Amino acid sequence: MADEVVLLDFWASMFGMRARVALAEKGIKYEYREEDLRNKSQLLLQMNPVHKKIPVLIHNGKPVCESLIIVQYIDEVWRDKAPLLPSEPYQRACSRFWADFIDKKLYDAGRKIWSTKGEEQEAAKKDFIEILMQLEG
């Protein structure tokens, strides 16, 4: 029996993008299901009853939630493909640090740009650019 892989996601989600990139890097074929975040599907609510958010990877009927956990799952399940993380422990730790940095810094800064106006929004834009420059470095 072939693997059935479904990704519940929203096109603009940076967290969903993380899962889509991992699937693409591993060459995994999957069904993409776009979610309306204002009117969540019954499938999303059933597959992620705790947080009720995307992304959700459904592998052979079993849900995996939270983007970093999804990426780790993809890497562990499809071991026959090139690994997503470096094999050396320190390099893996560095990769995980930057993923955590993005979760904690980039997302919050981006959200402030969308949810504020005026001077507060301008400050958020500056913070966002500084974060991107730090990532670039």
Image (tube, rainbow, N blue to C red):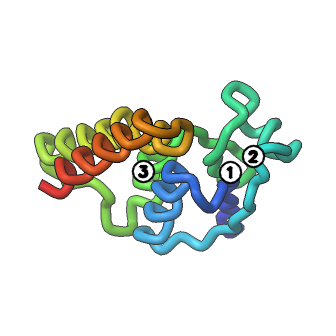
Q: Residue at x 75, y 39 (%)?
A: 47
Q: Secondary structure at mark 1?
A: strand
Residue 87 vs 62, above or below: the answer is: below
Q: Classify 10 Å Cα crowding around label 3: few (below 14), some (14-19), many (20 and above).
A: few
The answer to which of 128 and 23 lies nearer the viewer is 128
The answer to which of 109 and 49 lies nearer the viewer is 109
Depth-wise, is mark 1 or mark 2 nearer the camera? 2
- Give the residue type that dot 2 points to: Leu
Q: Secondary structure at mark 2?
A: loop
User: x, y percentage for residue 49?
Assistant: 75, 29
> How many numbered discs?
3
Q: Classify 10 Å Cα crowding around label 2: few (below 14), some (14-19), many (20 and above).
A: few
> Contact (CB < 8 A) between labels 2 and 3?
no
Residue denoted by label 2: 37
Depth-wise, is mark 1 or mark 3 nearer the camera? 1
Q: Residue at x 39, y 66 (%)?
A: 80
Q: Earlier in the sequence, mark 1 or mark 2?
A: 2
Q: Is residue 46 left or right of residue 3?
A: right
Depth-wise, is mark 2 or mark 3 nearer the camera? 2
Q: Quadrant of residue 93?
A: top left
Q: Classify 10 Å Cα crowding around label 1: few (below 14), some (14-19), many (20 and above).
A: some
Asked if residue 51 shows in the view, the reply is yes
Q: Earlier in the sequence, mark 1 or mark 3?
A: 1
Q: Secondary structure at mark 3?
A: helix
Residue denoted by label 1: 58
User: x, y percentage for residue 1?
Assistant: 71, 67
